[in-house]
Image (spheres, rainbow, N blue to C red):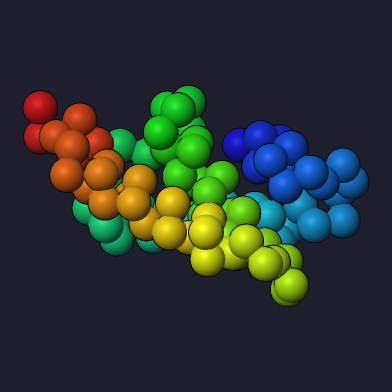
Amino acid sequence: MLSKVKQALRILNTAFDTEIQDLIDSAKADLALGGIKKLEETDANIQRAIILYCKAEFGLENKDSDKYMKSYMYLKARLSLSKEYLNVI
């Protein structure tokens, strides 16, 4: 997941790997707090949610932060309403 997020952030070096991994872990924890139990990193929706979260939270002067956070929150809400992600199938 780290390499996918770095690609989405346009980061080519390893200087921010620890910070980015912390954001990935934080995104997963936030999704879990929202009731989402299916957090498989191979799932396209989970990948997209983690990437959106990281794009919203990475960087000090991120002018698009609000846009990415709104997208993340919308996707998180949709996932939290889906039986597939709540393991209620």
Farthest residue to the bottom: give it: 60
Quadrant of residue 70 within the rendered picture: bottom left
- Vertical order, 44 against 28 (above or below): above
Residue depicted at 67% across the width and 62% down the height = 58
87 on left or right of 16:
left
Residue depicted at 44% across the width and 51% down the height = 71
Q: Nearer the viewer, residue 10 or 4?
A: 10
Tell me residue 32's x, y (percent). 32, 53
Tell me residue 46's x, y (percent). 42, 37
Tell me residue 68's x, y (percent). 53, 55
Farthest residue to the left: give it: 89
- Vertical order, 10 against 89 (above or below): below
18 on left or right of 55:
right
**Count of numbered labels shown in the rendering:** 0
Residue 24 makes an appearance in the image: yes
30 on left or right of 19:
left
Residue depicted at 26% across the width and 51% down the height = 77
- Vertical order, 80 against 59 (above or below): above
Q: Nearer the viewer, residue 63 or 47?
A: 63
Q: Nearer the viewer, residue 76 or 19?
A: 76
Point out the image quarter for the N terminus.
Answer: top right
Residue depicted at 34% across the width and 51% down the height = 74
Point out the image quarter for the C terminus.
Answer: top left
Residue 29 makes an appearance in the image: no
